[in-house]
Amino acid sequence: MIGRFFYLPGTKKFNITPRFYDPDKDERDERERRIKEDLGIVDEKKDDVKDFRPNIKGRFRMAQEGFTKSSDDARRASNRRLIILIVILALIGYLFFYSDFTF
C-alpha cells in the first residue's frame, strides 16, 4: 500500500504506424511535383488545399439552429425555473412553520 502512495506513472507514448505506405508512390509524387515545378505547371487542386482554412467556429450551432436556444433564452428559462423553485420552497416552509397543517 505504501509503495502505491509514492508511485508516479510514466509518460504515455503515442506511436502509430501508417497502415498503407507505398514508398514508390511517394517517390513518384515527389518526382512529379519537381517536374511540374520545373515546367511551371501549377496544380490548382493542390494550391487550394494549401490555402484552405476551415472555419468551423459556430458551425454546429448554425446547423442545429432550430433545435437549440440562444444563450439569452436559456438564461431566461433557467431564471424562471429558479424563481418557481424558490416560490414553491417558500410556500412549503410557510405551511410547515406557520400553519396548523399536520402531516
Image (tube, grey):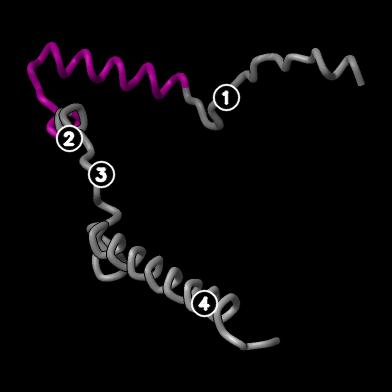
Q: Nearer the viewer, mark 1 or mark 4?
A: 4
SS at mark 3 in the image: loop
Residue 44 part of the magenta-drawn span: yes
Residue corresponding to mark 3 = 56
Residue corresponding to mark 1 = 17
Front residue of this view, candidates 39 and 96: 96
Q: Would you say 60 lies left or right of 81 here?
A: left
Q: Would you say 48 lies left or right of 9 here?
A: left
Q: Nearer the viewer, mark 3 or mark 4?
A: 4
Kind of residue at badge 2: Lys
Q: Which residue is at a point 40% across and 24% down the rendered structure image?
A: 25
Disc 3 or 2, which lies upstream in sequence? Answer: 2
Q: Which residue is at a point 13% across and 11% down the rendered structure image?
A: 38
SS at mark 4 in the image: helix
Residue stretch rendered in magenta on the structure: 23-46
Kind of residue at badge 4: Tyr
Kind of residue at badge 3: Ile
Q: CA distance from mark 4 to mark 2?
A: 73 Å
Front residue of this view, candidates 21 and 28: 21
Residue 27 part of the magenta-drawn span: yes
Disc 1 or 4, which lies upstream in sequence? Answer: 1
